[in-house]
Image (tube, helix red, strand yellow):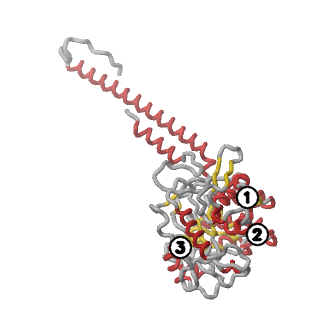
Amino acid sequence: MQCREAPRRGRRGAGHSKEECLVQWSCNLHEESRRISSLMNRAATLAWSSFCIVIMCASLVAPAMAANYAPEARTMGINYGRLADNIPNGATTVQLIKGLGMGRVRIFDFDAATIQAFAGSDLELTIGMGNLDIAALADATAADNWIAANVVPYYPATNITCITVGNELFTYPEQASIWPSLVPAITNLYNSLQNRGLTRIKVSTAVEYSVLAASFPPSKGVFREEIAQSVMKPLLAQLDSTSSYLYVNVYPYFGWASAPADIPLDYALFTRPTVFTTDASSNGAQQYDYTNLLDAQLDAMAAAMEAVGYGDVRIVVSETGWPTMGDATTLGANITNAQTYNNNLVKWALNNPTKGTPRRPGIFVPTYIFAVYNENQKPGPTTERNWGVLYPSGKAVYPLDVSSSASGGGSSSGGGGGASQPKTCNGRPSVLSLSASFFGILFNLRI
């Protein structure tokens, strides 16, 4: 229908025939329809443009999103070793651990009775295996059978959250033939968990601090040459792609005891009130001040990870602590120092808001104290048998304040909890936040 303007005859409606009014009404309706259609097309064009922007931005941030870590509960962890003939059974130990205020526990094997003891406790449990178990798991079928036997029967009643494949593997040159099997074993176990729908369980390994060839200053941290490219780089690539953590056993005690003339005791115990050492980033653009040795050790590890291209992988302190007794010539192994270190460690780990380290500020570091008990059957010097926070009777070796250390509680992921815009682990906007912006455009569009 072609619309023409009707002849004007005085006031609105005056002198119009019924037919002329009907034609004019139809024309007006058609024009309004065209206007609305034009606005809708404009809205669709804007929406499509916004969507394209979202996709483009998502592609820009995608490489940084490989390791996308969920918020972690702000709780303390503890290692539960059992190389002793005088410690309580698993059920009693679980209650003692809960009484300490711990939220996480790490064991070093996959003992069925021990795993079962944690059923219904709500404690997050990391299970492990011996280094000699690793090679067989480089076979996918063997790895799947391992998951079927050691995880499926107990989960989710027992809150298994991680599997550590071996412990301090790179300490032992005689086990070098196992090193190439580590990443395939981790990958196979992870794939088995995914195929079974057990997607909340991470897979990693616990490495010793001696994987570093250099650690001072922290910004110069690098991995040992024989493992940097052949093992550590593919290991970190696997952890990065699965948003898993690198578990690190790190003991400021040993760092201090090996060089007491160079490292002050208060620097190792978290009691130093002033900066002990200052470091700069590799390009000199950033300065890092260190008041405690653990920060420096963790940042040296982070620098080594950056050097092989995986600086976004998060760290878990899988073991740390202080011995309460040593041999006659052992320095600093006493209850006073152990109490000071572990209580300050809890404050460091659970500080709210999260402090992180100078190189990784605001990043929560899940931390496990070593250990629940003194273990009387461990070989080696006296210190090896005296790391526990409890005697075999269950009595505390010294007071350990865990429950009151996290002022405000909650959880942390990078920013230490609290409401903020969703981000990736390196601070760039996530696809989620970009998508929210897209829907905001649609919501605020005026038609």
Residue shown at 65% from the left, 46% from the top: 286
Q: Mark 1 or mark 2, which has the lower sequence index?
A: 2
Q: How far is disc 1 from disc 3 in space, using C-alphas?
A: 30 Å
Q: Amino acid under label 1?
A: Ser
- Find residue 13 and report its horizontal and vertical position in percent: 20, 18
Q: Amino acid under label 2?
A: Thr
Residue shown at 73% from the left, 53% from the top: 220
Residue 269 seen in render: yes
SS at circle 3: loop
Q: How far is disc 1 from disc 2 in space, using C-alphas?
A: 17 Å
Q: How far is disc 2 from disc 3 in space, using C-alphas?
A: 31 Å
SS at circle 1: loop
Q: Amino acid under label 3?
A: Leu
Residue shown at 53% from the left, 77% from the top: 97
Residue shown at 70% from the left, 75% from the top: 130
Q: Quadrant of residue 106?
A: bottom right
